[in-house]
Amino acid sequence: MIKSVATILAGLLALSPAIADPGPASRAARKPAPATDYRARLPQDEVIYFVLPDRFENADPANDRGGLTGDRRVTGFDPTAKGFYHGGDLKGLTKRLGYLQDLGATAIWLGPIFKNKPVQGAPGRESAGYHGYWITDFTQVDPHLGTNADMTALVTAAHARGMKVYMDIIINHTADVIQYRECTEGTPCAYRDRANYPYQRKLGLRGKPINPGFAGDAVHTPENFARLTDPGFAYTPYVPAKERTVKVPAWLNDPIYYHNRGDSTFTDESSTMGDFSGLDDLATENPRVVSGMIDIFGSWIDRFKVDGFRIDTARHVNPEFWQAFTPAMLDRAKANGIPNFHIFGEVAYGTMDPGYLARFTRVDKLPAVLDFGFRWGVTDVVAGNKGTNELAALFDGDALYEHGADTAMILPTFLGNHDQGRFARDVRRLNPNASEAEVLARVKLGHAMLLTLRGVPTIYSGDEQGFAGDGDDQDAREDMFASKVAVYNDNRLVGTDATTATTSFGTTHPLFRQIAELARLRVAHPALTRGRTLVRARGDTPGLFAVSRFDPVTGAEMLLAYNTSAKPLTSAIQVETRSTRFDTLAGACAARATAPGSVTLTIPAFGYAVCAAETR
């Protein structure tokens, strides 16, 4: 049984600092004025909101079926099924920009909007491309989401409010169009490696010679790849007649530009050369693919003046591709008057390991990566009850990134997403006996870390309304507009008695209010956006974690303290000797230092404090 909101909030008061509802008038007064210099902001100055457009708001039901006719196996539209299109569109996102601005978001990470193959999968196991990762046409908006003109309108409206727009792009693969003669259509094909299936033999070591003179995929010259003419080295690829020209630009329809080696095992060479669950894996070593992708995505910068790219499946592309692609995109952006274009790659990983992530900034030369280390560190400590020294280890790892802490500062940080699932679900899963008040307190503590620690905080759509989800992937992709999906609508949300069966755009949810307050606090204080981090307190059990961050111009100290334990704590924390008086920005701070170089704080269970040292 779900406890009432009153009961939940009453219990919460004893667990963590509450943030009073400022009321509509005050919220309106605090709404940021449209910024004329939004492009001057650095990546770390942003608060990002990540949204899958299909699941956000449906402002134009006329495009729900993408201009197609037939049942869901043709149109992809079924608002009652979690794996199909639900009707959200770009007009809906434009309509709700004010809501995002009220939340404190300054940048929108837009899930992929390119035209997708509407439906994929073997009979009986079909699902739709509502998520945007099954691209057929890289040049236009998916008709289910609207038109290129709708994209122009969205970016224009966001920029008028001083908000940036980041596009989610895919280079590793396209939709599943190419099939293999040796496999039944719609079934997995085992990966075939280069040792046993070399480029110069047909279907294996004993096959007839093919591709004479090809020196292998490590020689990245047009002359070498001109000798690769037969794609039948591992399998015999073909394109079904009805899909022979479905991909745009047209060069993408030729199997020679794909690896054609079967499904990835996500290990060894298959990690960059295998098909991602059957999706056609592009041969990104080929110079024609490199130049083609630069043309495609450079055109989106030219046409729509977007402010950054999140790169899907970046770890599954060879480093040399990124070494060419990234500077080309940065140059294209600068030519369009976008000096702080933000590029960050998805390097999905399942543990708190900054060293693994850092490799992709050093070897692949990606400017930034999604901070999976942060996601797992906060999950382990706040939801999983591990010692706070894990967070200290996370920040110790900042030195490993290319350019060290400067790069760590622009890593988008997050608590959960559309693939890994939601943070609230992790809190419940790892604390099955916790009260709803405790669950909400832990979730708020996680968001306090997200919005005050280093990195670029990224809110996943719905987290601000207490969405918890049932699991990963489709089970974490709930609708913000009134949902018709039964397995979403029976979910127990956090901090509210509401369900996803009703529209979720209110501004009174305790998480919405907390995020809005901390987002505005963050962007108002350079110490929280650009300040260096110094760990002050850690432990091998749940309890105190504290860091100082410093204004990059004045050097003024901001003390951030968090209590990850179920009991209140009082502790002395080291600060700079010049930090003798403090203002409370969140939680409860001591007005004065206890002694030069030390301040004593009392923090409730799962509480936090943000304390600004006075500069006089």
Image (tube, rainbow, N blue to C red):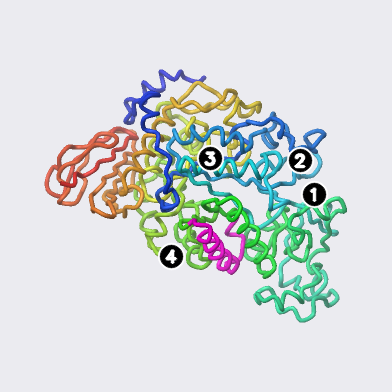
Task: Locate residue 20: give its quadrant.
Answer: top left
Q: Is residue 522 within the magenta segment? A: no
Q: What kind of element bears circle 3?
A: helix
Percent of width and height locating residue 165: 53, 46
> What residue occupies the far left of the structure in this picture?
595
Q: In front of the other: label 2 or label 4?
A: 4
Q: Which residue is mark 3?
A: 157
Counting other residues with Cα less than 10 Å from the Cα at mark 2, is it few (<14), some (14-19), or many (20 or more)? few
Amino acid type of the residue that numbered disc 1 sits on in the rendered structure: Gly
Q: Which mark is residue 289?
A: none
Percent of width and height locating residue 354: 44, 57
Q: Which mark is residue 402?
A: 4
Amino acid type of the residue that numbered disc 3 sits on in the rendered structure: Ala
Counting other residues with Cα less than 10 Å from the Cα at mark 4, is it few (<14), some (14-19), or many (20 or more)? many
Residue stretch in magenta: 313-338
Query: Disc 2 vs disc 4: Cβ atoms closer than 8 Å?
Result: no
Name the residue located 31 percent from the left edge and 37 percent from the top edge.
608
